[in-house]
Each structure stands twice: as structure tokens, then as C-alpha cells.
Image: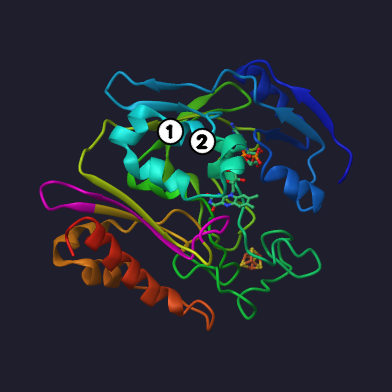
Amino acid sequence: MKPFTYERAESPAAAARAAARPGARFIAGGTNLLDLMKLRIETPRHLIDVNRLGLDRIEPTEDGGLRIGALVRNTDLAADRRVRRDYAVLSRALLAGASGQLRNKATTAGNLLQRTRCPYFYTTTMPCNKREPGSGCSAIDGFSRGLAILGTGAACIATHPSDMAVAMRVLDARVDTVAADGTRRSIPVADLHRLPGDTPHIETVLAPGELILSVTLPPPAGGTHLYRKVRDRASYAFALVSVAAVFGTDGTARFAFGGLAPKPWRAEAADAVAAQGPQAVAETVLAGATTTRHTAFKTDLTRRTLAAVYADAGRG
Ligand SMILES: Cc1cc2nc3c(=O)[nH]c(=O)nc-3n(C[C@H](O)[C@H](O)[C@H](O)COP(=O)(O)OP(=O)(O)OC[C@H]3O[C@@H](n4cnc5c(N)ncnc54)[C@H](O)[C@@H]3O)c2cc1C
Ligand code: SF4
């Protein structure tokens, strides 16, 4: 690990100001950032600990939604009575992620901003455009079993690994931030993550040093909430394919997908054919999929996962 300096910020404004320092990075639970630092994939010169900013509350919003502080731990969010009752897809997605021990440390903001699990991103002896821009992508002709088939480009086919973000996407959450100059903004989670294009190392629309304060959920939509994750083993494994679904009482449904794309993936056109059943949804979502010899199985797996979700919802 490279030497770095450390400070504990006492307010969001102080944290955002400190982030203007060259090489500064926020640290929350540290469950992703510290691993990346040990491997020298990330080499911040200054760490700003955001754990004491008072952003660890879950509060109702005026319009009947829920504001989730950036520092709320994944365990606490999954267990929250209002989340379990009104946003069960979020609770289920969180509980499908990582392990109990990790969820006790992992935070809402850190989870959204965790980095890919592409094996070559972590293998510093191999080319990787995301880790070292312009060096090439080892995965496209290499071992790509866990990687993306939608929204990819010639430079990178990595997936976004978060389960929680997939549920946030189906719920149309918004991310509330403050920049180093004090400017606040609210970003739809749909727009938070970027597709790789020619710059896979730029993963979000956040400016350097922009601090996530909270994530806001709209008022509950009701319906049946499901999260189904298919992975290589029952715990401690990232999604090969995951589906977050909200089935309305009026026959409508909304879907978001994990394990398939560089960002939590939603195809609104798929919602429009929900009444036609899982195969119609799958064909709509998979239109334009680009597979490798290792990821070709993901198309069938998506079809089967959707069929299982429909069966779970009593629509099979
Ligand atoms: C073995 C293992 C298995 C896992 N399995 C899963 C899984 O199945 N599903 C899943 O979804 N996840 C999984 N994870 C990932 C885990 O959920 C993430 O590591 C965790 O959510 C990151 O949160 P954190 O608070 O620890 O982030 P940190 O490591 O502290 O930070 C991550 C990033 O977020 C930035 N950041 C943190 N807080 C803020 C803020 N308020 N504003 C702006 N930037 C901020 C940091 O600078 C850093 O870039 C796994 C992790 C491990 C180690
Ligand atoms: S898929 Fe992306 S993260 Fe993986 S090796 Fe290629 S450029 Fe790197």
C-alpha cells in the first residue's frame, strides 16, 4: 500500500471542501476501497473518513418517500421496517449481496460506487483499459464469464457489481450530492453510472470530490416486489444475472437487471410487454446483446431467471 494521509471530516461541507485536495478520496466502510489500495489499483494520497458526518439516518420525505443517508449500513437499510414494507425489492437485493459481516460495514453510497469485479481489473500484470486507460482489454478475448452483454463497448465489457443499485434503479431512486464548492444536485440513479464508451475508467457523472449525501426513494408504488439473483454459489458471489421486479396490481410490471451491463440496467420497452410474459420481456431486454464465447449462456439464463420471477409473482 502506498503512504497516504488521513482526516476524519466532521461535516458534509468540510468533507466536500477537503476533497478539493489533489489525490483526495472519501472512505466509508472501506470494504472496496481498502482492497483496491492494497493492490495499488487505487492510490489516493489523502483519505477523508466520512463516517462521522451524521448521514446515517433513514427519514421520510415530505412527499411520502424515504431519504436514506449515504452512511446507512447495508444491514440497517435491509432491516428497516419501512423498507421491508414499502420497498421490499431493495431489502431483498441487499440481503442477496456479499455476506452479513460485509453488509455491517458497507454503506449506501459506497455500495453504489463500488468498482467492477472483472478479474483483469484486479490482475495488475494484465492490460485493462479501466485500470490503465489505453492499455487494452484482456477480458474481451479472455475469461469473461461474469462480464457484460448489454451496454458494452470495444474498450470494456465489465459489469457493475452492485445488487442494491439494481433495486434502486427499478425504484427510480435519486442520488443527492454536494460538490466541493457547496453546490448541491439531485441525480436520477439512472444517470449516475456511465457506459464505458472510450473512457471506461470514468464510471459515474460525479465530479471529483463530489460527496453523496443521501439516496431518495419516491413514494411507495405498492405491488409485489421480487429480487432474484443467480450466482455460482449461494453466498459471497456476485450476480451472473439478477432481476429486480415490481409487479403492479393492475397487470403492469417494472424490471431492472444486474450482472448484464456496466450499470444497473433497465429497458423501459420491456415493461411495456410485461403482460405478454417473461419471454417477451427477455427478448426486448436482450435485443442488441453482444456476447463472447464465455457470456453467451447469459441470454438463456436471463430468459430462465425472468420465467422464475414471473412464477414467484404468481404470473407464471
Ligand atoms: C468478498 C466480497 C463480496 C461481495 N459481494 C457483493 C455482492 O454480492 N453484491 C454487492 O452488491 N456487493 C458485494 N460486495 C461489495 C460490497 O457491497 C461493497 O464493497 C460495499 O458496498 C462498498 O461500500 P463501502 O462503504 O465499504 O465503500 P468504500 O470501500 O468505503 O468506498 C467505495 C467507493 O465509494 C466512495 N465513497 C464512499 N462513500 C462516499 C460518499 N458518501 N460520497 C462519495 N463517494 C463515496 C469511495 O471513495 C470509494 O471510491 C462484496 C465485497 C466483498 C469484499
Ligand atoms: S472488461 Fe473492462 S475492467 Fe475488464 S479487463 Fe476489460 S477494460 Fe478492464
The secondary structure that dominates the magenta segment is loop
Question: x, y (%) of residue 186?
Answer: 43, 31
Image quarter (top left, top right, bottom left or bottom right) of the C terminus? bottom left
Q: Is residue 239 magenta?
A: yes
Q: Is residue 247 magenta?
A: yes
Q: Could you tell me if residue 286 is visible in this image?
A: no
Q: Could you tell me if residue 59 is visible in this image?
A: yes
Residue 75 numbered mark, or none: 2
Instruction: Write the residue at 53% across / 64% down.
Output: 233
Q: Quadrant of residue 110?
A: top right
- Name, please, the residue furthest toward the left: 250
Question: x, y (%) of residue 24?
Answer: 75, 34
> Are discs 2 and 1 less than 8 Å apart at CB?
yes
Q: Dot 2: within a 10 Å radius of its alpha carbon, few (fewer than 14), some, or many (20 or more) residues? A: many
Question: x, y (%) of residue 254?
Answer: 26, 52
18 to 277, vertically: above or below: above
Residue 152 numbered mark, or none: none
26 to 147, vertically: above or below: above
Instruction: Write the residue at 68% across / 64% down.
Output: 129
Instruction: Give the residues in magenta.
Output: 234-253
Question: x, y (%) of residue 4?
Answer: 85, 36
Instruction: Write the residue at 55% across / 36% down.
Output: 109
Q: Name the residue tied to disc 1.
A: 79
Q: Dot 1: within a 10 Å radius of its alpha carbon, few (fewer than 14), some, or many (20 or more) residues? A: some
Q: Amino acid at mark 1?
A: Ala
223 to 296, vertically: above or below: above
User: Could you say which is closer to the camera, residue 189 or residue 167?
Assistant: 167
